[in-house]
Amino acid sequence: MNRLFVALRPPAPVRDALLDLMDGVEGARWQDEDQLHLTLRFVGEVDAPLANDLAAALGGINSPPFETELAGVGYFQRKGRPTALWARPAPCAPLDILQRKVERVCQQIGLEPEHRKFTPHVTLARLGRHAGPINGWLAEHGTFRTGSWQVGEFRLYESTLNAGGSQYDPVASYRLQA
Ligand code: 3AM
């Protein structure tokens, strides 16, 4: 079985800007540079034939390159407790269109539809039960903005769960073309 997801990989200068945000919350498990990504679709565990179908079907997506930027930070919470810190893209119609194309392909090959609303973000940290307060961090980085970059490809990633965190390995890249 392969645990897969489809994502964008921010370019190096953007990753550097994200790494600069990774301080100031006690107990936060900050992501490593090589973990940084913007998930378009979490696929989950699929067997090898389905993984191959997905890899091939993603190659059929036709979408032009587009510009995007990250603007703002925030957090996810569960039962009133913050669980993750993230940076989010500014509203970006081409990003939403690409996400919908990826979703359509996933359904065409037989995956269950993703019903949760697409909330584009780049996870910066996971927060356990004993993490410190995040209000200061949120206030400090409220005006975070990367400047825009061109998205020229998206990737299929394999996720491996290790004791120390998740390892994300790109298994295929798909060039966006006008
Ligand atoms: O893009 P982020 O870092 O927010 O949390 C996992 C990570 O999200 C998420 O998929 C991304 C790559 O692993 N993920 C893991 N299990 C998931 C699940 N069961 C999940 N997303 C939705 N459902």
Image (cartoon, helix red, strand yellow):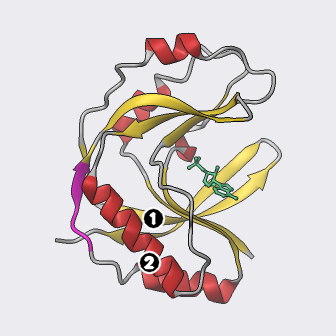
The residue depicted at 34 percent of the width and 58 percent of the height is 96
Residue 16: percent from the left, percent from the top?
Answer: 41, 31
**In the depicted structure, whether residue 24 falls above or below residue 33:** above
How would you rate the neighbour count of disc 2 (Cα within 10 Å): few for under 14, some for 14-19, many for 20 or more? some
Q: Is residue 147 above or below residue 10?
A: above
> Disc 2 and disc 1: Cα gap in Å?
16 Å
Looking at the rendered image, the quarter that the N terminus falls into is bottom right
Q: Which residue is mark 2?
A: 104
Image quadrant where one finds the C terminus: bottom left
Q: Which numbered disc flags the more N-terminal residue, 2 or 1?
A: 2
**Residue 13 coordinates in the image, percent (x, y):** 34, 35
Q: Which mark is residue 155?
A: 1
Give the residue at x 62% y 77%: 112
- Asked whether residue 126 is in view, the answer is no
Which residue is found at the position 57% from the left and 17% from the top?
A: 23
The magenta stretch spans which residues? 63-67
